[in-house]
Amino acid sequence: MEFGKTTSIGKIANRLQKQGKKVMLAAADTFRAAAVEQLEIWANRVNCKIVKKEEGSDPASVVFDAIKKAKEENIDVLICDTAGRLHNKKNLMEELAKINKIIDNNLPNSSKETLLVIDGTTGQNANQQVKAFKETCNITGIVLTKLDGTAKGGVVIGISNENKIPIKFIGIGEQIDDMEEFNSQEFINSII
């Protein structure tokens, strides 16, 4: 079964590299046990660079170092893996705001995407997730995962519409290439 955020990052990095882009990953989810190691596995799998620090490090410092290294190495796309949850929502939102400020200050003229990964099996709970993240981040898109089994993910259509956030990608399986750009007509046909 496809997992979620880290897997999606690896698959997106793979897609970008196949398009000829130089990709670097920043392992800024330093709070979740094994998150850095999981991202490192994906970096090796797709053969891209990674900037990391030990578990418990300041996530914003990882992003700062990654931006510096990406500039030095002429990287086309920097993907920052940030925490999706912490022991308390306030800490998570403060950390995300700090990371966004570092990106804005150090890459002021770059185009920035903030993608929220939603598990297709989550159901109505996903709406609360989107609203919580929208308070702090300008979410530019949704990545819908785990659409490889019985989960249809239909709830995300209402969430996307209500919050005016487009669905960018869908994860449809376990393999490295099982990430597709979202096609609304195909998605609706699969639900019906």
Image (tube, rainbow, N blue to C red):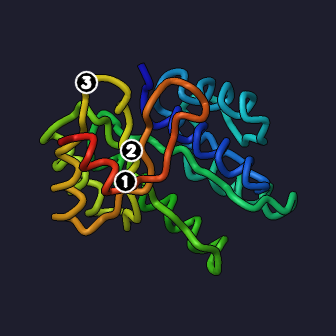
Quarter of the figure with the N terminus: top left
In the rendered structure, the answer to whether residue 34 lies left or right of residue 187 reads right
Residue for badge 3: 150
Give the amino acid at mark 2.
Val
- Residue 54 in percent (x, y) is at 65, 30
Task: Give SS at disc 1.
Answer: strand
Q: Nearer the viewer, residue 62 or 143?
A: 143
Name the residue rendered at 12%, 41% in the picture.
124
Sequence-earlier tag: 1 or 2: 2
Query: Could you tell me if the residues under marks 1 and 2 are in contact, i.e. CB atoms within 8 Å?
Result: yes
Task: Give SS at disc 2.
Answer: strand
Check the image and name the residue furthest to the left.
124
Residue for badge 2: 117
Q: Closer to us: mark 3 or mark 1?
A: 3
Query: Could you tell me if the residues under marks 3 and 2 are in contact, i.e. CB atoms within 8 Å?
Result: no
Q: Nearer the viewer, residue 52 or 73?
A: 73
Residue 30 lies in what quarter of the image?
top right
Tell me the CA gap for discs 1 and 2. 6 Å
Task: Give SS at disc 3.
Answer: loop
- Residue 156 in percent (x, y) is at 23, 49
Residue 142 — which label? 1
Name the residue rendered at 64%, 74% in the picture.
110
Residue 67 lies in what quarter of the image?
bottom right
Tell me the CA gap for discs 3 and 2. 18 Å
Name the residue rendered at 54%, 28% in the picture.
35
Give the amino acid at mark 3.
Thr
Sequence-earlier tag: 3 or 2: 2
Tell me the CA gap for discs 3 and 1. 20 Å
